[in-house]
Image: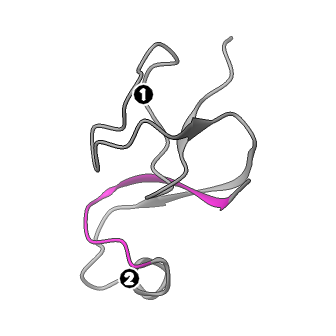
C-alpha cells in the first residue's frame, strides 16, 4: 500500500498518491510526513473542525511536517 500524501496548507489527506495538487485548496505543497488522522463529518458543529479551521467535511491530518 502506498503512503498517503497530505496537503501542507489545509491538512487534507489526499485520496490518491498520484495526485499532484490538493483538490480542496489547489496547493501543490504535499508531504508524506504527517501524524494523526481525523474524519470530520459535520464541520459546522465540530469543536475539532473549529480549532483546525476546517469548513468542509473530509479526512485531515492532525500534525503535518
How many numbered markers are drawn?
Answer: 2
Check whether the beta carbons of the residues at disc 1 and disc 2 lie within 8 A of each other: no
- What span is in magenta? 53-63
**Image position, residue 63 (x, y; %):** 70, 61
* Image quadrant where one finds the N terminus: top right
- Name the residue carrying label 2: 46
**Image position, residue 54 (x, y; %):** 36, 71
Q: Who is closer to the viewer here, 28 or 56? A: 28
Residue plotted at (40% across, 86% down): 50
Q: Earlier in the sequence, mark 1 or mark 2?
A: 1
Residue plotted at (28% across, 71% down): 42
Look at the numbered disc 2 and give the secondary structure of its residue.
loop
Q: Who is closer to the viewer here, 28 or 46? A: 28
**Image position, residue 57 (x, y; %):** 29, 59
Q: Is residue 40 above or below residue 14?
A: below
Q: Is residue 27 above or below residue 42?
A: above
Disc number lying in front (1 or 2): 1
State left or right for residue 62 relative to residue 18.
right
The disc at residue 44 is none
Residue plotted at (47% across, 57% down): 9
Look at the numbered disc 1 and give the secondary structure of its residue.
loop
| Label 1: how many Cα within 10 Å (few below 14, some 14–19, many 20+) | few
Based on the picture, tell me whether residue 59 belongs to the magenta stretch: yes
The way the protein has been coloured in the rendering is one colour
Question: From mark 1 to mark 2, how far is it between C-alphas?
Answer: 22 Å
Residue plotted at (44% across, 88% down): 47
The disc at residue 15 is 1
| Label 2: how many Cα within 10 Å (few below 14, some 14–19, many 20+) | some
Amino acid at each position: 500500500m502506498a503512503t498517503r500524501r497530505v496537503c501542507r496548507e489545509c491538512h487534507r489527506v489526499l485520496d490518491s498518491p498520484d495526485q499532484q495538487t490538493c483538490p480542496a485548496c489547489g496547493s501543490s505543497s504535499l508531504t508524506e510526513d504527517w501524524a494523526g488522522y481525523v474524519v470530520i463529518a459535520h464541520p459546522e458543529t465540530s469543536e475539532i473542525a473549529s480549532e483546525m479551521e476546517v469548513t468542509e467535511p473530509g479526512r485531515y491530518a492532525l500534525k503535518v511536517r
